[in-house]
Image: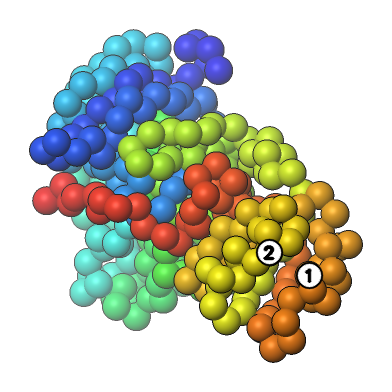
Amino acid sequence: MTQSSSLLEVRDLVRSYGERRAVDGVSFSIGKAEVFGLLGPNGAGKSTTFHVLTGLLRPDSGVFLFEGAERSIKDRALRARVGVAFQKPSVDIKLTGRENLALGASLYAVPKAQARQRIEDALQRSGLAGRADEPVENYSGGMRRRLELARVLLSDPALVILDEPTQGLDQGAFRKFWEDLLKLRDERGLSILLTTHDPQEAEYCDRIAIMDHGKIIECDTPENLRQKVGGDVIVIEATDLPALATEIEKQFSVKPVVSELDLRFEHERAHELIPRLVEALPAGRLRSVAMHRPTLGDVFVKLTGRSLDVDTDAKEESAA
């Protein structure tokens, strides 16, 4: 992506905690009207990157360009163009939905002449108009998330940064949130940066940067990333997974990745290998054997040898 087509460009971002580099030379760019995701397990550096980009942590070093011009991450003009939604919704549950939006409009210094109409538009767009005058404590998790997004958009930002935006939502609320978000992107030309550890959520991104141990180890479209996995993925649930992985490696010349729940490996002709596996392994060892097309979670396994649900050694620290 060229500089002229980028809304935000980050170059060589570094942030350390003592001797440990939580973010280690991270560079990426986000295009106008692009959904860009940072995908990785807990401790990969996503949250620290989020906290730096939202001004909650000071970077050790790094360059930030917004619309082609170098800016300080604390620049007030830059902050006015960026909306932020944190992992835990920060709406006041004792206030109504409408009152939360009015408070947000005041905090964002939205002119009073525009605030009322923006609030009404936001309530309609988020599907909350019928519940606008109820206390937010009566809202579901999905409704609270939509209210949070509606509040962030009151200032008409060019870029919205979201931290694990759908964590804890059920599938219905998850789909509704993304349906609304992509519609906003299409209608308003909104750029979106999100952090996530969920491969399903990352599929909604136009491009994904996969993070591990503070570095971006791969960045591409979901389709191109999935093509890095050479075949279908076989997933086995069984007793004594480490021993079984060793046995499979010896007999079939593949190297399974073992997690707490299962072991998995890729194979170009998985449908032909599965019957041979079942026949070769002792009866009663296998609980289940399944096959699926590669996911972004499988891409992470391919690149790192670990599952996305396994935390890295060092936890990221809070910005508090």
Q: Which residue is mark 1?
A: 277
Q: Residue 56 at x, y = what percent?
A: 17, 40
* Residue type highlighted by circle 1: Leu
Q: Secondary structure at mark 2?
A: helix
116 lies above or below 55: below
Q: Residues within 10 Å of mark 2 (few under 14, many from 20)?
A: some
- The answer to which quarter of the image holds residue 161 is top left
User: Which residue occupies the extreme front position in the image?
Assistant: 250
- Colouring chosen for the image of the structure: rainbow
Q: Secondary structure at mark 1?
A: helix
260 lies above or below 305: below
**113 with respect to 289 (left or right):** left
- Report the residue at 30% width, 53% height from top: 313
- Report the residue at 25% width, 60% height from top: 90
218 lies above or below 275: above
**272 with respect to 48 (left or right):** right
Residue 190 appears anywhere in the view: no
Q: Which residue is mark 2?
A: 248
* Residue type highlighted by circle 2: Ile
The numbered dot on residue 210 is none
Taking depth in this image into account, of 185 and 253 the one nearest to the observer is 253
Q: Residues within 10 Å of mark 1 (few under 14, many from 20)?
A: some
